[in-house]
């Protein structure tokens, strides 16, 4: 049977990673989130720390890219790659890693424009997890032990970063129902409800 991939776009603190981990447990396949960054860094030759500091954060500052480039090790040897700004190198490295993972194994990939990277992949389920702001604020307050106002600021900032990153690198709009196969409200469905909806879709598509 051919490999299949479930991609999970998510609003900050909407439990997207938790849903991915639960799916991983139920289906017996790996869930890649931060782990993808480590592999992309290793395969590209770029410094892993840069992948984490620039994770899902586009930057329009060419000067910043040039400065950070001095810390990026050797990177790919191809001339076009060497001429790219650092943020483009990071995206390309992740893009290639996502495609390799899909070829190697069935898996779940959280964020990083995985749905865009796999736009030509035959067996992919693209999902987006969202939730009411109050629900996400409560999650952030609990996870990070911060005030309500701080939690709200964190959420708005992170959502803006993810939206900018996705819209910048893909040809789609972050969070728009047209960009995904399934758009699920985790505040109403809960983790198990979201997992069951994705599993049902997988069953219908016969992946």
Image: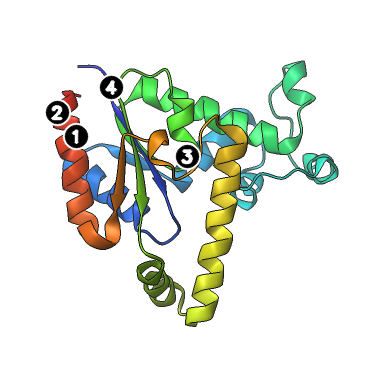
The quarter of the image holding the C terminus is: top left
Disc on the earlier residue, 4 or 2? 4
Whether tag 1 and tag 2 are in contact, CB under 8 A, the answer is yes
Residue position for label 2: 204
Mark 1 — residue?
201
At which x and y percent is residue 77?
72, 20
Name the secondary structure under disc 2: helix
Label 3: state its secondary structure.
helix
Give left or right: position of 49 versus 62: left
Q: Of the residues under marks 3 and 4, which one precedes in the sequence?
A: 4
Label 3 crowd (10 A; few <14 / some 14-19 / many >=20): some
Mark 1 to mark 4 CA distance (whole Å): 16 Å
Q: Earlier in the sequence, mark 2 or mark 3?
A: 3
Q: Residues within 10 Å of mark 4 (few under 14, many from 20)?
A: some
Identified at 52% across, 41% down, the residue is 38
The residue labelled by disc 3 is: 36
Residue 137 appears in the figure: yes
Report the residue at 45% width, 34% height from top. 114
Observer-nearest residue: 124 or 55?
124
Between discs 1 and 4, the one toward the N terminus? 4
Residue 102 lies, in percent from the top left, at 38, 25
* Number of on-image labels: 4
> From what the image shows, is residue 49 above or below residue 84?
below
Which of the two residues, 93 or 176, is positioned nearer the viewer here?
176
Please say if the residues under marks 4 and 2 sit with CB atoms less than 8 Å apart: no
- From mark 1 to mark 2, how far is it between C-alphas? 5 Å
First along the sequence among labels 3 and 1 = 3
Q: Give coordinates of residue 11: x percent, y percent.
A: 43, 54
> Element at badge 4?
loop
């Amino acid at each position: 049977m051919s490999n299949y991939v479930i991609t999970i776009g998510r609003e900050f603190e909407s439990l997207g990673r938790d849903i991915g981990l639960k799916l991983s447990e139920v289906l017996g396949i790996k869930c890649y989130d931060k782990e993808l960054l480590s592999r992309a860094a290793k395969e590209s030759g770029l410094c892993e720390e840069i992948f984490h500091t620039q994770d899902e954060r586009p930057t329009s500052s060419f000067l910043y890219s040039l400065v950070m480039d001095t810390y990026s090790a050797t990177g790919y040897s191809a001339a076009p790659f060497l001429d790219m700004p650092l943020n483009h190198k990071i995206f390309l490295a992740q893009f290639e890693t996502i495609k390799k993972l899909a070829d190697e194994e069935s898996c779940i990939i959280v964020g990083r424009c995985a749905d865009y990277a796999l736009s030509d992949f035959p067996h992919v389920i693209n999902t987006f997890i969202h939730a009411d702001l109050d629900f996400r604020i409560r999650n952030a307050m609990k996870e990070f032990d911060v005030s309500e106002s701080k939690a709200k600021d964190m959420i708005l900032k992170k959502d803006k970063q993810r939206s900018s990153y996705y819209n910048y690198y893909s040809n789609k709009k972050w969070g728009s129902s047209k960009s995904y196969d399934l758009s699920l409200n985790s505040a109403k469905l809960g983790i198990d409800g979201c997992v069951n909806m994705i599993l049902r879709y997988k069953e219908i598509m016969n992946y």
